[in-house]
Image (cartoon, rainbow, N blue to C red):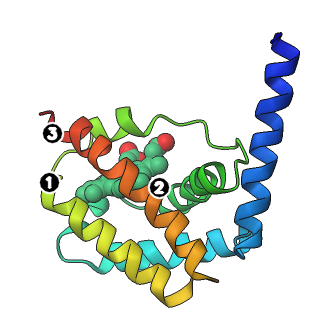
Amino acid sequence: MDSAEAYRIALEKRQALQTEARGFGIDEAFISELVEQFYRKVRLDPSLGPVFARVVKDNWDPHLAKMKLFWGSVILRSGDYKGKPMEVHRKVIGGEPEHFTIWLRLFEETLDEIAPSEEAKALFLERANYMAPRLKLAMFGE
Ligand code: HEM
């Protein structure tokens, strides 16, 4: 297979995944709402709130914008997020392993409230559950 062929296959795969996600009712407006509502909960949470307050400070608008690009890239394959989550979490001071459990619980709670379908909820949770142990490892090592 030459590189043009590989590129064509990758594009088709990306298109198929995006079409599937949109079929579950996921679009940019939903991702925006999910991120806004989830971080509203995070900021109010007695464990997570202070960690984010210390790191994000009053830069919430850029943080939320970045998280919308992140989920758009993960779920809709937009390719717009260019960050390095592992490196970023390695530098987050004051996190504790239990924070990941709380993070995932609040994420699921938000999806229960507003996800357009069960499939949409499952897709986001699957990605979050995949990333959580990896980010945890980045934060705390083995
Ligand atoms: C599966 C769970 C998680 C996912 C998918 C996730 C994802 C992300 C992503 C994509 C970013 C943006 C990185 C960038 O700047 O490019 C971010 C930033 C951040 N995350 Fe997480 N995260 C998770 C769990 C947590 C937990 C448990 C904590 C802390 C208790 C945390 C604290 C932070 C903080 C403070 C930032 C902002 C860092 C900064 O702006 O310097 N994250 N997260």
Q: Amino acid at mark 1?
A: Pro
Q: Label 1: few (<14), some or many (≥20) within 10 Å? A: few
- Which residue is identified by label 1? 97
Instruction: Name the disc covering residue 129, or none.
Output: none
Q: Are marks 3 and 1 in contact (CB under 8 Å)?
A: yes
Report the label total: 3
Q: Is residue 37 above or below residue 27?
A: below
**Which tag, 2 or 3, sits closer to the chain's start?**
2
Label 2 belongs to which residue? 127
In what element is the residue under mark 1? helix
Disc 3: which residue: 140
Q: Quadrant of residue 141?
A: top left
Is the residue at mark 2 in contact range of ligand 1, meaning its CB lies under 8 Å from it?
yes
Q: Residue at x 51, y 64 (%)?
A: 124
Tell me which label, 1 or 2, sits earlier in the chain.
1
Taking 7 as reference, is 55 above or below it?
below
Alpha carbon distance from label 2 to label 3: 20 Å
Split into 4 quadrants, where in the image is the N terminus?
A: top right
The answer to whether residue 22 is left or right of residue 84 is: right
Return the residue found at the far front. 1
- Which picture quadrant has residue 40? bottom left
Q: How many residues crowd around disc 3 within 10 Å: few (fewer than 14), some, or many (20 or more)?
A: few
Residue type, numbered disc 2 = Arg
